Image: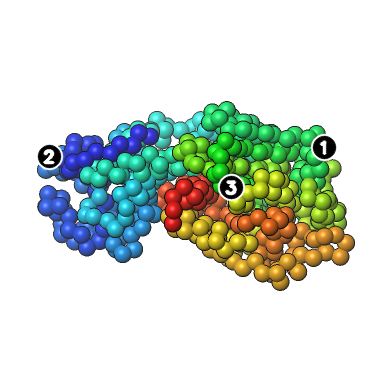
Amino acid sequence: MEIMVKSGDILGEPADLAVLASPEEVALPAAVAELIEGADFRGKAKQTRLIYPRGAVAPRRLLLLGLGKPDKLSADTLRQAAATAVRQAQELQVARLTFGLNGDLDLAPERIGQALAEGFELGAYRFQRYRSDLSDEQRFVVEGATIVASAEALRAGVAIGQTIARGANFARDLVNTPPNDLPPARLADQALALGQRLGLNVTVLDRARLVEGGFGGVLAVGQGSANEPRFIVMEYGAANQGAPTICLVGKGLTFDSGGLSLKPADAMTTMKSDMSGAAAVLGALQVAAELQLPLHVVGIIPAVENMPGGAAFRPDDVITTLSGKTVEVLNTDAEGRIVLADGLHYAQRYKPDAIIELSTLTGAIVIALGSHAIGMMATNQELADRIARAGEASGERVWQLPLWDEYREMIKSEIADMKNIGGRPAGSITAAAFLANFVGDYPFVHLDIAGTAFAEKPARSYDAPGATGVGVRLLSEVLRSYGTPG
Ligand code: BES
Ligand code: ZN
Ligand code: ZN
């Protein structure tokens, strides 16, 4: 979508649809107040009124959009407002809309521009690739949005927000793509194509290379599928001398049937989304490269399909991971941590300043936090705090759980260095405790996105049924925070 910023007065600009977003308790412009009955629009959160002014003001249609109480207003309020605006344009088949804010907001202009651009792009997203039955109306595309505002500083924010949201939409496409069309090799092709386009170094290890290299975790989980695993490494900014090195590790289970510890049918649907961590890493690398961030970012993705084929790994197996540490398998559905063990160990070769890992790792985090927060566990509080701040800024909020030594006791095994499950109590934390065995002393944060990656019933205006693209906005803010002090 084309997003522009223009100074002026939204009521004086001709438009097929003008959207005026207004907080509660802020008086409407007189020309608008005259068009409605006093109490019909008060700016309450998510309130909308569509007006046909018939020449009273320049726009042909005017959508009033409530932003709620000023003290509760955040960047996410604006993100959602912009998404509502673009969806209204889609519904009305209006190709271009104008958008204005009523009154001054307590947010930096750059943040306002960024949030609005993100909202427009995220709100316009639809996944229609597999639909041959759609009407022209359903395919209608909103081409452009013009933000009518005085602040020049908005413009820089718009460019950043647009780049970030496109990264998120790229991740959504990958997650929404059905697993028969995105086996590990095809996910690797996506990484290679991204690398081509943006000048990243991309290395893909196939099965033979994995055997040679001793990637025992990836190989074990992948051995029950006819679609062989891949190990993907992507590097941005290797030439940025002296810049911090950040390793992003993403769980890339292109499908998780559970393996021999087979999932029940109802739990197996949506498991194409088990590569959402990988998608977030790909999206974040796209953003880092497009924004030319002064960093060295390494994306590491074990891409694997977990299937119960005749050669599948079994409960009772003991496997030797890339690190040399052994794992007693008690449940083949706890497979993410096994492939991540190899991914995290591999990250150590970059001597990173931070290892940030994202995975749809546990059903337990869905129970704990639902779809409103990412679960966070960390070995380094400074890094955790940085991510928590980025969570607030991006609207992809995280909530930290403890990672005390006691939890590590829960995954000790009699016959191997550790076992791959710790029982039902603290399921998300024991999973993190398992992962922490493979990061050495490097600052490490684990983000469990099982509750936030895929929305069967979207909770926010800019979400759509299916993939949310979670992680891309969060990681983008984290990466950007290294370039800006505070
Ligand atoms: N991919 C699943 C976790 C998941 C659950 C993601 C729901 C998204 C929505 C993971 O591989 C898994 O199956 N975890 C098991 C672990 C258990 C066997 C210890 C789980 O959470 O049930
Ligand atoms: Zn599983
Ligand atoms: Zn899984």
Point out the residue furthest to the bottom here: 406
Point out the residue furthest to the front here: 242
Residue at 60%, 51% in the rendered image: 353
Q: Are marks 1 and 2 in contact (CB under 8 Å)?
A: no
User: Residue 433 occupies which quadrant of the picture?
Assistant: bottom right
Residue wearing tag 1: 212
Identify whether 73 is placed above or below 132: below
Q: Quadrant of the N terminus?
A: top left
Residue wearing tag 2: 55
User: How far across and how far down the image is residue 311, in percent?
Assistant: 84, 42
User: How far across and how far down the image is residue 13, in percent?
Assistant: 18, 38
Identify whether 390 is placed above or below 272: below
Q: Earlier in the sequence, mark 1 or mark 2?
A: 2
Instruction: Mark 1: give few (<14), some (14-19) or many (20+) Cα within 10 Å.
Output: few
Instruction: Mark 3: give few (<14), some (14-19) or many (20+) Cα within 10 Å.
Output: many
Q: Nearer the viewer, residue 168 or 43?
A: 168
Q: Nearer the viewer, residue 472 or 95?
A: 472
